[in-house]
Amino acid sequence: MGAAVAIFGLLLDAVSAIQTFVTVFISVYGILIFAYVLASWFPRLPYSLQPVLRFLYDVCDPYLRLFRRFVPAIGAIDFSPFIAVLSLYALDRIVNDVILDRLH
């Protein structure tokens, strides 16, 4: 009986760790997308920031390209980052509420 309780406790700890990881990962990725959008508004940033801009481009652009296929830019405004961040937070809610809360 004590071993079953210990295994169940370890399972709950693992579920909590997964929930925390998913939430933090999605939050950080949302912040990176926000920084990418802000950096795109200023095309003439100092040369010393080029590695940071390249990192943001390498990390964010593949994900944003998924949404740029379906969400066209309206004039000079690109709504794909907005839709991408909303889908990230929807994924966070789905993972936390539907999948992982069933194990608690």
Image (cartoon, helix red, strand yellow):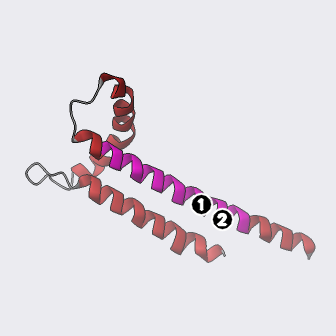
The residue drawn where x is 85% and y is 68% is: 6
Question: Does the magenta run of residues contain 23?
Answer: yes
Q: Camera-side residue: 92 or 45?
A: 45
Question: Does the magenta run of residues contain 58?
Answer: no
The residue drawn where x is 36% and y is 43% is: 60
The residue drawn where x is 34% and y is 62% is: 86
- Residue 76 to residue 99: above or below: above
The residue drawn where x is 28% and y is 53% is: 81
Q: Which residue is outermost to the left?
A: 75
Q: Give the SS element for disc 2.
A: helix
Q: Which secondary structure type mostly characterizes the magenta part of the structure?
A: helix
Question: Circles 1 and 2: CB distance less than 8 Å?
Answer: yes
- Which residue, given by chain and number where applicable, does mark 2 sit on? 16
Q: Which residues are magenta?
A: 12-36
Tell me the number on the disc at residue 20.
Answer: 1
Tell me the number on the disc at residue 61.
Answer: none
Q: Give the SS element for disc 1.
A: helix
Considering the image in quadrants, where does the C terminus appear?
bottom right
Q: Amino acid at mark 2?
A: Ser
- Residue 63 to residue 12: above or below: above
Q: Position of residue 67 (x, y in %)?
A: 27, 53
Q: Position of residue 88 (x, y in %)?
A: 40, 59
